Image (cartoon, rainbow, N blue to C red):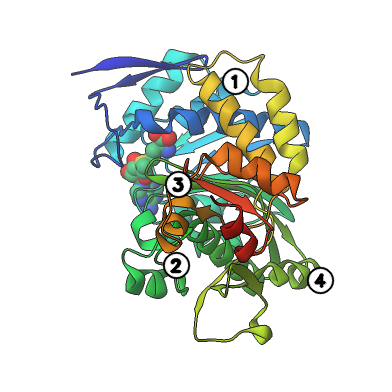
Amino acid sequence: MATLVFEGETKIFLEEFHDYSGPGRKHAGFYNPVLEIDRDLNVLFCRYIAKKGAKKFLDGLASSGIRGIRIAREVDGDIEMHINDCNPKSYEIIKKNVEINGVSAYVYNKHFCSVVQEKKYDYIDIDPYGSPIPFLSCIFKALKKLTYISITATDTATLCGAFDKACIRKYQAIPLKKHSVKEAGLRILIGYMARQAGSFDYSFKPLIGYSYGHFFRVYAKIEKGARKSNENIKNVGWVGWKNGWKLFEYDELDKSFIAGPLWIGKIYDKEVIDEISQIVDKKKLNKKEKLKKMLAHFKEEESLPPLYYETRYIAKEIKTAQPKIERLIKKLKNKGYKAGKTHFMSDAFKTDAPYDEIKRLFG
Ligand SMILES: C[S@@+](CC[C@H](N)C(=O)[O-])C[C@H]1O[C@@H](n2cnc3c(N)ncnc32)[C@H](O)[C@@H]1O
């Protein structure tokens, strides 16, 4: 049934509304309510980059047009919005939604790769069904010296090790299979982007990377320059389990227990999180409280090491009950270690404590 949905300051006409709780089913004018929280974050991120000078924005896989239209309506300043979808019916829906919202936007009915070959953008949004890989190879010829980008991946089962062969084939990386699979999956996606960027003499710096429901999303900055790219690629490495998590560069690697290559550097930029956290309160958003909680998690995780420990596995190994996460974190901090919760899982924590110490403090 045709309906209007309201997000932020934007209303969107849909020919059909489906209350999906997962990835949903492909159709013209596709709209997934689960991603509203990301579209909120997307608007705040675009406000941040507009303040930094970004002017020309592309919503490359737009469907109903909701992302691009929200950016056009809710980001202040002198920006130019371009919205594209290759589906002719989606194209008509986007034009209608642009009109309903009274925003100014260029609307295209083209293949993503031809749009990015024709014009250069300061911000490119890639929000596909499933894997973003088909859309990544064409962007590097089309970038400015500095381009902001955001990428969604909903092929999380592949990245998280349920289909390891597909992960090796598509992302050229070995996924983790048990502990910390969500964060490792996200880091494989970021690592893949950094390697692709490196091959075209670009650096790829994640500013916010996170997991929510059925998707991963990465907001990043891509910059031209071989020197920057050389520095950047040092953040691509391997992880393995050896009495606790360890990070390895390639040459240090014992190749018998590995996952990677993946991103081993930071996945949050403190300045971006702080700026966005300051403006979130001033915005009209349906998911404001959830988003604030998420941003608080990112802020905490920014200072913590990569990967997390899941209490259920440790409890099983040492044959004890799962402790309260808050109490365990307090104990670790009292001993002088870094420790905190993670947005990836509610029964997991991050710490720089050695694994033997974690087990000692577990009871
Ligand atoms: C997941 S939907 C986008 C959802 C939308 N960004 C949102 O936030 O609601 C993916 C869209 O990509 C479009 N698409 C798929 N392949 C494309 C291509 N090569 N070029 C342009 N659009 C494409 C599909 O028609 C579909 O509308």
Residue in the picture at 59% in, 67% down? 245
Q: Amino acid at mark 4?
A: Arg
Which residue is labeled 1 in the image? 74
Circle 4 SS class: helix
Residue 104, above or below 318: above
Q: Amino acid at mark 1?
A: Glu
Task: Give the Cα separation between the discs numbered 1 and 3.
Answer: 44 Å
Task: Give the Cα separation between the discs numbered 1 and 4.
Answer: 36 Å
Which residue is labeled 2 in the image? 176
Q: Residues within 10 Å of mark 3 (few under 14, many from 20)?
A: some
Q: Position of residue 122 (x, y in %)?
A: 67, 44
Are the two marked residues, 1 and 3, in contact with CB atoms closer than 8 angstroms? Answer: no
Q: Amino acid at mark 3?
A: Gln
Q: Which disc is residue 227 wearing? A: 4
Task: Give the Cα separation between the discs numbered 2 and 1.
Answer: 39 Å
Q: Position of residue 48 (x, y in %)?
A: 71, 32
Q: Nearer the viewer, mark 4 or mark 2?
A: 2
Q: Residues within 10 Å of mark 4 (few under 14, many from 20)?
A: few
Instruction: Name the quarter where the N terminus is drawn.
Output: top left
Q: Residues within 10 Å of mark 1 (few under 14, many from 20)?
A: some
Q: Choose the circle earlier in sequence order: 2 or 1.
A: 1
Q: Choose the circle earlier in sequence order: 3 or 2.
A: 2
Which residue is labeled 3 in the image? 322
Q: Nearer the viewer, mark 1 or mark 3?
A: 3
